Image (tube, rainbow, N blue to C red):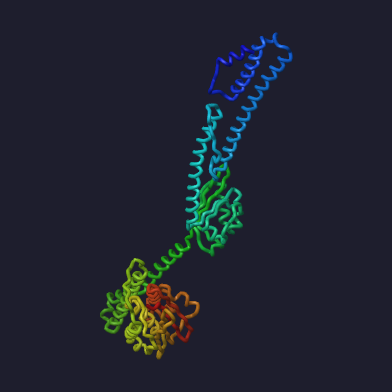
Amino acid sequence: MMVISERVFVRPNFRSTIFQRLFWCAFLAEAAVAAVLAAGGGLRGLTPGVWVVAVAGALAIALALAFALSRALDRRIERMRVFAEGLLEASEGAGSTVLTYLGVDQLAALDRSLLRMAGQTRVLVERAKVEAARREAILASMAEGVLAVDENLRVTFCNAALARLAGTRTPSSGMPLMELVRDTMLQDTLSQVIKSGEPVKLNLQIPAGGGRSFELLAAPLVSGDRPGAIAILHDITDLERLENVRKDFVANVSHEFRTPLAAIAGYAETLLDGAIEDQVNNRRFLEIIRSNAIRLNSIAADLLTLSELQTREQVQNTEPVPLSEAIDSALSTVAAEAALRGVSLERGPVDDLVVMGSRYRLEQALVNLLANAVKFNRPDGKVRVEAKRNGASVGIMVSDTGVGIPSRDLPRIFERFYRVDKARSRQVGGTGLGLSIVKHIVERMNGGVSATSQVGKGSVFTITLPLT
């Protein structure tokens, strides 16, 4: 025993392992037994009772030291266990338990490693929280609908825009896609993306969105080893409407210019072919050419007016406009044509009111309404203008006893180039832009215009403007 103890003693290692500490406990117990034996002159000098007591004492010392060391190790390991569990709950603060790494053994080294890892984990968790909050804010504020599904077409993410489109506030995670958005094309597209792994782009209409049109961009989305798909839906309803308006506008302008241009070219060619010497018809041909040239000029002027009114950057000069003066000026402008067509003009009661806006534009709107009322009236018909206050606004009413407008056409009469009776409109010289100009002028003055009519009895157009 002494030989072993000496071998251990002569190789002390203060930077010892746990097992070496156990060896130190055994060495101390052995030293205690050796001391007892030395005091008693060895085994031969001891009685059996004393020898048993010495051995038992040495074992008791060894067991006490081992127990104390085991309890200390248990406490340190328990602290490390609690600390590690705190790391798992990083969202609540990684490493809430304080570690002390007094000493130079392996457990102290492990303590230091855990502390360094806790600091790095805390930084990574905070960074992940910031990134997640930023991502959520970006997705929530997007006007486009964003949807993510797993391989079983169950919803894993849905932003607020798509929730509004689907008509729900809080779609639960794991909800089947068909329960959220009842559209087979969307479901088939996402299934195709998951299977093929290739992005898809197409246009579709979703019934839940009120028949609006969407541009769908779907791409594969892999979460871990599970495939899925992400879809972004961009509302293109307004873009399609504007594109249709543009196409209709180009078609209408082309049609409106084609007729007078054809007439001008035809009659000019006729005159050049010798009709200019025809004293009976040459003047009539020139009058037709002049009439169509005036028509072209009127269309171009109205188009320029509409362009100016629709330009948001245009600064409109506003001024107080007395209604009575604007109405009187408009009546005097159309008086000659009314007399020529046998239509009487009446000025009803007009309150002494003032509105803010452009006097020139307001008179232009009134002239357009009065001119239409005269042109589409019957002989011996009447056109009446009156203005009445209605709370904080004023209503200007232009009524006539003309042919009237069918109810099916009323919703569209303020569109550009829309005509109820195309043949008669061209016959009386209308461009199809007058009412559209009226609508834009009134809207720029923060007002509105409406119409009521009965076929064969006449129409009433009402301009509503806010008072100053």
Residue 424 at x, y = what percent? Answer: 41, 81
- Image quarter hosting the N terminus: top right
Residue appearing at x 47%, y 86% in the figure:
456
Task: Decide if residue 117 is on the left or right side of residue 363.
Answer: right
Residue appearing at x 55%, y 18% in the figure:
12
- Image quarter hosting the C terminus: bottom left
Residue 138 at x, y = what percent? Answer: 47, 53
Nearest the eye: 323 or 249: 323
Residue appearing at x 59%, y 22% in the figure:
20
Residue sticking out furthest to the left: 277
Residue 229, above or below 397: above
Residue 143, above or below 413: above
Residue 432 appears in the picture as rendered:
no
Q: How many marks?
A: 0
Residue 439 at x, y = what percent? Answer: 40, 75
Q: Splitting the image into 4 quarters, where does residue 46 fall? A: top right
Residue appearing at x 50%, y 79% in the figure:
407
Residue sticking out furthest to the right: 48
Task: Decide if residue 364 is on the left or right side of residue 169.
Answer: left
Residue 399 at x, y = what percent? Answer: 42, 85
Nearest the eye: 59 or 357: 59
Residue 102 appears in the picture as rendered:
yes
Residue 166, above or below 198: below
Q: Splitting the image into 4 quarters, where does residue 349 fall? A: bottom left
